[in-house]
Image: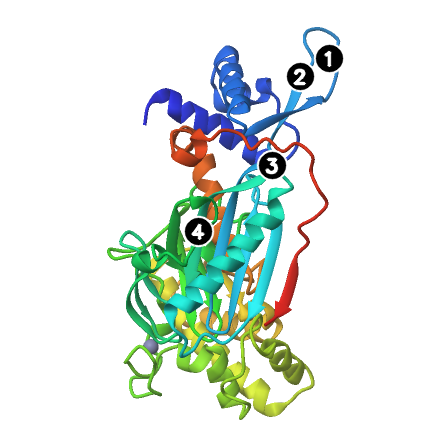
Amino acid sequence: MSLRRQNLALALRCIADAKGSVSRADISARTALNKSTSSSLVDELIAAGLVRELGVTTRPAVGRPPTSLALVAEGPAGLGIEVNVDYIAACVVDLGGAVRYQHVVSQDQRGQNPQDVLRRAVNLGGAAVRAVAQSGLAPAGVGIAIPGLVDSAEGRVVLAPNLGWSDLDFAALLGSPDIAIPGGVDVVVDNEANYAALSERELLIEGSSFLYVFGEIGVGAGLVLGGDLHRGRNGWSGEIGHITVERDGPFCGCGGRGCLEQYAGQEAILRAAGAEADAGTSLGVGPTVTMIRERAERGDRAMTGALDRAGRALGLVVASVMNLLDIDRVVLGGIYKELSRQLLPVVREEVAYRYAGSRWALPQIQAAVHGSEAPALGAARSVVRQIIDDPAGWLGSPTGARGPVGLPAPAPSAQPATSNA
Ligand SMILES: [Zn+2]
């Protein structure tokens, strides 16, 4: 990357990360770029439609008053789409990562034709894009989250056991004539837990390392090392749900036995409690996680026992991962966020017992900020994060070259919504 390109990214990152107001002089002070360089970088970012001037903040006794800068609230947006076992979701964020639109539709995808499922999901994304267009937002890219092993580079879903999909050429499906990608922009397909990890904006700071565990019907993980998602050789890392808890335990959809998912996945919790085994996820066909939590809070012994068993299995696996990686933070998302009151104490106790370093440095184990909406949100944020990380690269791309989206009047539309199909 050229120096100019790096500096442009540095200046934009400085504006994106600013907690309060930030001026040209602040950028110069924080980046060690000289004043005229930082000022001309800012002019370039304004001309590109990525940064706006908010006006004069304070009037100094002498000299020119500083103008406060911010990311544009209209213009390039990130579209995230999630295909889960029993719901599809779409989310649009602006360049700052703020949610501008969210929509969830409950429908069971099991046994459905993948092309039909994908068409419905992409149509939901199209509706989201139309809803935010009047606010001057246009998608710069699309991220699609899938619950399974995904080869992002090839656009292939290798295995999504809970959807019953394997060896699916997703790129070819996306190219079929009945599937219209909103805005004709680039699409990236990735694992849902990877995207969910990227929704934790406060934790995604330079150099940070954490394990994000996403529980739904399946259990996945996103592993962030040194500020970046660790994908592994094939992009299949993070399949924590298929780590063995018991060698001869229950059979699993992956073909193995005794996997974590068979103890700590939502359906495993329901089965252990003697409840309906095929009930839906938190956003899906039946709001099952609320039922689990309410029964546990009422002191239902079968449910508290099932959650204890799930928490022990989860803690056992998390402690093993801690022993291997020595990282300082674990985040529990998806249904685990909603069940954190029941699960966190058990997981913490198990990790304290089994992690060799726990007497000296117990890892922080916490609930995620976002629940089941995290994958679509993280997918959307991954799109705008790419622009922040390399604005010059985006400006050179076909979407960036279209220039700023010129619809000035912001409309109070785009309210978050959920519905049942
Ligand atoms: Zn398995």
- Residue under label 4, please give it: 181
Q: How far apart are marks 1 and 2 (CA)?
A: 8 Å
C-beta proximity under 8 Å, tags 4 and 2: no
C-beta proximity under 8 Å, tags 1 and 2: yes
| Furthest residue in direction front, as rendered | 177
Between 284 and 181, the one lying in front of the other is 181
Classify mark 1: residues with Cα within 10 Å, few (<14), some (14-19) or many (20+): few
Across and down, in percent, residue 90 comes to 54, 57
Across and down, in percent, residue 153 comes to 28, 51
Secondary element at tag 4:
loop
Q: In which quarter of the image is residue 245?
A: bottom left
Q: Residue at x 68, y 53 (%)?
A: 415
Quadrant for the N terminus in the image: top left
| Furthest residue in direction left, as rendered | 233
Secondary element at tag 3:
loop
Between 128 and 166, the one lying in front of the other is 128
Secondary element at tag 2:
loop
Q: Which amino acid does label 1 sit on?
A: Pro
Q: Distance between the residues labelled 3 and 1?
A: 31 Å
- Residue under label 3, please give it: 74
Between 366 and 110, the one lying in front of the other is 110
- Residue under label 1, please give it: 60
Q: In which quarter of the image is residue 136?
A: top right
Nearer the camera: disc 3 or disc 1: 3
Q: What residue type is labelled 4?
A: Ile
Quadrant for the C terminus in the image: bottom right
Q: What residue type is labelled 2?
A: Pro
Q: How far apart are marks 4 and 2 (CA)?
A: 42 Å
Secondary element at tag 1:
loop
- Residue under label 2, please give it: 66
Q: In this view, does 55 lie to the left or right of 384?
A: right
